[in-house]
Image: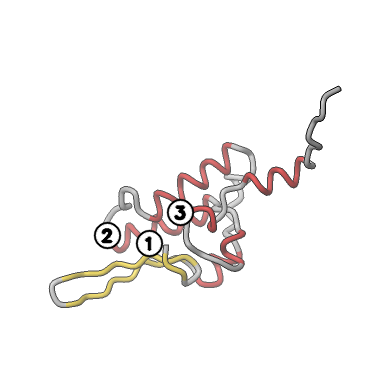
Amino acid sequence: MSQEQPRRPREKQEQEDRIRYGDVFEVSGELASKPVAPHDSGLMETAEKTAFGETQMCGTATVMRAAANLNVRAGLVDREINDPTKVSVAQGVSVTQTDVPGRRIFTESVDGRTG
């Protein structure tokens, strides 16, 4: 007689399998529990292109795009719904530049939290 683990309901398992902001960035609160969605990563790509002229290799937008694509491929987030998370609408995404003598410091943020 085998002792199989009880299976979790599929919906609960899917929610746990999503790649959330808290899985890839040091964030907490509501943002940490939200899945990374294609629309949010697109917003960050636009912000990076505005600030740098192109998307940064291995930058925040690239990480967000990879996480969103994994969520879409797993069927956990819909690519067709251009519905940003309520979090990204509240504070948005941004790339800011700070000039200090001899340096430029760029800060990328989602919902006011740096990534």
Instruction: Give the residue at mark 3.
Output: 42
* Image x and y of residue 75, in percent: 63, 39
The residue located at (59%, 68%) in the rendering is 29
Cα gap from disc 2 to disc 3, whole angstroms: 15 Å
* Image x and y of residue 59, in percent: 35, 53
Image position of 76 (left or right of 46): right
Q: Which quarter of the figure has residue 84?
A: bottom right
Q: Nearer the N terminus, badge 1 or badge 2?
A: 1
Q: Nearer the N terminus, badge 2 or badge 3?
A: 3
Count neighbours of disc 3 (C-alpha within 10 A) and say few if under 14, some if 14 to 19, many if 20 or more: some
Instruction: Give the residue at mark 2.
Output: 52
The residue located at (82%, 24%) in the rendering is 2
Instruction: Residue lying at the far right in this picture: please name it.
Output: 1
User: Is the Cβ of the residue at disc 3 closer than 8 Å to that at disc 1?
Assistant: no
Q: Nearer the viewer, residue 71 or 9?
A: 9
Q: Quadrant of the N terminus?
A: top right
Cα gap from disc 3 to disc 1, whole angstroms: 9 Å
Cα gap from disc 1 to disc 2, whole angstroms: 8 Å
Q: Quadrant of the C terminus?
A: bottom left
Q: Which quarter of the figure has residue 52?
A: bottom left
Q: Amino acid at mark 3?
A: Gly
User: Is the Cβ of the residue at disc 1 closer than 8 Å to that at disc 2?
Assistant: no
* Image x and y of residue 99, in percent: 21, 75
> Mark 3: which secondary structure?
helix
Vertical side of 75 occupied by 60: above or below: below
Instruction: Give the residue at mark 1.
Output: 47
Q: Amino acid at mark 1?
A: Ala
Q: Amino acid at mark 2?
A: Phe
Q: Which quarter of the figure has residue 107?
A: bottom left
Q: Nearer the N terminus, badge 3 or badge 1?
A: 3
